[in-house]
Image: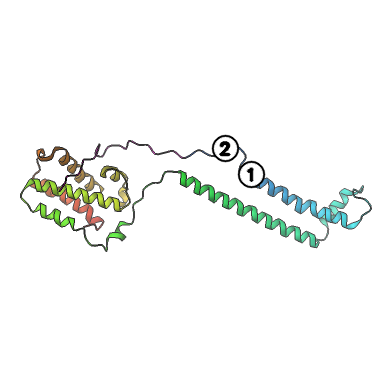
């Protein structure tokens, strides 16, 4: 079996920096402010000016602007609600509802645009639900077979193969990255109880990949590393 290339930097710090949140729009007046001003002016026109005009011109046609214009406006506003007043009330309510709906839709569109512009974080999938009913990975049997050998070279291969299984499992859980180290750095320990076991076993694998046959691996050390991998796989029902 081909040995897997070592990670660059092991469990070191990430080189990249997360992209910042995009800056806001232009410095001009906002759509919400413009709609609010339109709504205020419309309400004033419908509730104050129109009823007064209806009352004013419904009472006399002698002159367009009589001397008692102020009194007539007041009388028109305080008088009995006419059919025209009901219509104006209905139209104003419909207009206000339309403005509220437009503001809601605008806010929703802006929220979606902001979410699309922000960098997405990788979240772990519900691995227990996906793999608990799945058949164990047959490659683990091959690894156990290699560990039955008395040859340290076979133990090294078994550790390398177990690390490949770990990378496959992390990929199925939704973690992304060019190496296992990058994927493990995204893990939330609250949802990955065996994260330390994974790191410990993966670091031994890196040492084997770098030093090859020069790395002295005892039987007990090999068994311990494989046991670390097994605890990780058992947590997520992977083998």
- The answer to which image quadrant residue 206 occupies is top left
Question: Is 140 in front, or is 225?
Answer: 140
The spot of residue 116 in percent (x, y) is: 46, 46
Q: Is 167 colored magenta in this rendering? A: no
Q: Residue at x 62, y 40 (%)?
A: 29
Q: Residue at x 26, y 45 (%)?
A: 180
**In the image, farthest residue toward the front:** 2
Which residue is identified by label 1? 33
The spot of residue 152 in percent (x, y) is: 8, 46
Residue 192 in sight in this render: no
Q: Main secondary structure of the magenta part?
A: loop
N-terminal of the pair, mark 1 or mark 2, is 2
Q: Is residue 72 left or right of residue 207?
A: right
The spot of residue 10 in percent (x, y) is: 24, 39
- The answer to which image quadrant residue 204 occupies is top left
Q: Is residue 13 above or below residue 111?
A: above
Q: Is residue 42 left or right of residue 156?
A: right
- Distance between the Cα atoms at labels 1 and 2? 14 Å
What segment is highlighted magenta in the picture?
1-21
Q: Residue at x 14, y 53 (%)?
A: 143
Q: Is residue 198 left or right of residue 71?
A: left
Q: Quadrant of the C terminus?
A: bottom left
- Crowd tier of the residue under label 2, counting other residues whose Cα lies within 10 Å: few below 14, some 14–19, many 20 or above: few
The spot of residue 4 in percent (x, y) is: 19, 44
Q: Is 6 colored magenta in this rendering? A: yes
Q: Residue at x 75, y 53 (%)?
A: 46
**In the image, farthest residue toward the right:** 62
Question: Is 189 in front, or is 121?
Answer: 121
Residue 132 in sight in this render: yes
Q: Is residue 137 above or below residue 114?
A: below
Which residue is identified by label 2? 26
């Amino acid at each position: 079996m081909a040995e897997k290339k070592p990670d660059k930097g092991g469990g070191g710090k990430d080189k990249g920096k997360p992209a910042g949140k995009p800056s806001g729009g232009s410095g001009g007046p906002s759509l919400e402010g413009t709609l609010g001003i339109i709504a205020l002016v419309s309400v004033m026109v419908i509730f104050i000016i129109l009823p007064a005009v209806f009352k004013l011109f419904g009472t006399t046609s002698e002159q367009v602007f009589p001397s008692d214009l102020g009194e007539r406006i007041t009388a028109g506003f305080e008088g009995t609600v006419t059919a025209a007043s009901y219509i104006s009330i209905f139209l104003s309510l419909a207009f206000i509802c339309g403005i509220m709906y437009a503001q809601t839709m605008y806010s929703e569109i802006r929220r979606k645009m902001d979410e699309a512009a922000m960098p997405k974080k990788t979240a772990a999938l519900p691995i227990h639900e996906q793999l608990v009913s799945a058949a164990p990975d047959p490659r683990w049997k091959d690894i156990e077979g290699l560990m039955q050998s008395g040859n340290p070279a076979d133990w090294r291969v078994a550790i390398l193969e177990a690390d490949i299984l770990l990378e496959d499992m992390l990929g199925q859980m939704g973690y992304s990255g060019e190496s296992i180290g990058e994927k493990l750095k995204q893990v939330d320990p609250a949802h990955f109880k065996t994260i330390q076991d994974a790191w410990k076993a993966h670091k031994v694998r890196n040492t084997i990949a770098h030093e090859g046959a020069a790395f002295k691996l005892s039987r007990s050390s090999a068994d311990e590393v494989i046991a670390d991998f097994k605890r990780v796989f058992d947590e997520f029902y992977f083998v």
